[in-house]
Image (cartoon, helix red, strand yellow):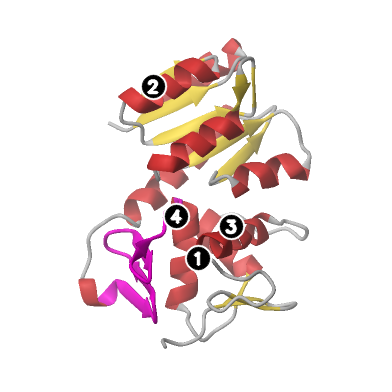
Amino acid sequence: MDTILVVDDEREIADLLEFYLKNEGYGVCTYYNATDALQCIKEKNIDLALLDVMLPDGDGFSICRTIRETHKYPIIMLTARVEDMDKIAGLSMGADDYVTKPFNPLEVMARVKAQLRRYKRYNEAAHEDENVFDYGGLIINHATHECTLYGEPIPLTPTEFNILWLLAQNHGKVVSSEDLYESIWGERYLDGNNTIMVHIRRLREKLHEPPRDPKIIKTVWGVGYKIDKHK
């Protein structure tokens, strides 16, 4: 049984999410502040986190950062604000998705299921020769969900790994932002959506790419992104 961490200081919302999650067969750890949630992260095995941005003793961003120091499981941010900067901040810190309040609990359940399904799918063992991408010093292992650069482990979130793997699978070809978004999130891409741009920027930072002249993930302006053929 998958265990979901729910953190929201609005008890009605937290308890409502707990009710729906338990009804779907998930185990749930519900907290109303950052302090208790951070203690839970240290002590329990979590499979996905739902984090409210605004908390009485901190914020969801700091919890997200702490999780990403040691864990790769999916993180969905819950925000009552609609500013793009909030969304960019969460995605930049390693969140995989976000939901704006007020929300339909059924939508949240759908996103939880989708994130868990992708996370598990990309962690399933498969044939080694079909699941390792070698691009010079960059090694992406689809079977183990590991990425190394010149032997150095690169800690990627599930979403970051999925984007990098999709680009690797299409090496030598340009993949549009629309195709990336719809393949990874399974939702229709809308003009002005900067989710992919934020994740690409974060990926480049982790791969130590120079922002003005990236060597691995290249931008094809007005089209999308690509990784060149195997070196």
Looking at the rendered structure, the kind of residue marked 1 is Leu
Measured in 3D between alpha carbons, the distance from the residue under mark 3 to the one under mark 2, in whole angstroms, is 27 Å
Question: Callout 3: helix, strand or loop?
Answer: helix
What range of the chain is rendered magenta? Answer: 130-157
Which residue carries the number 2 mark?
40
Measured in 3D between alpha carbons, the distance from the residue under mark 2 to the one under mark 4, in whole angstroms, is 22 Å
- Please tell me how crowded label 1 is: few (under 14), some (14-19), or many (20+) other residues with Cα within 10 Å: many
Question: Callout 4: helix, strand or loop?
Answer: loop
- Relative to residue 224, is residue 5 depicted above or below? above
Residue 11 part of the magenta segment:
no
Residue 157 falls left or right of residue 140: right
Which residue carries the number 1 mark?
207
Measured in 3D between alpha carbons, the distance from the residue under mark 3 to the one under mark 4, in whole angstroms, is 10 Å
Which residue carries the number 3 mark?
202
Q: Tell me which numbered mark, 2 or 4, is placed earlier along the sequence.
A: 2
Q: Nearer the viewer, mark 4 or mark 1?
A: 1
Q: Tell me which numbered mark, 4 or 1, is placed earlier along the sequence.
A: 4
Measured in 3D between alpha carbons, the distance from the residue under mark 2 to the one under mark 1, in whole angstroms, is 30 Å
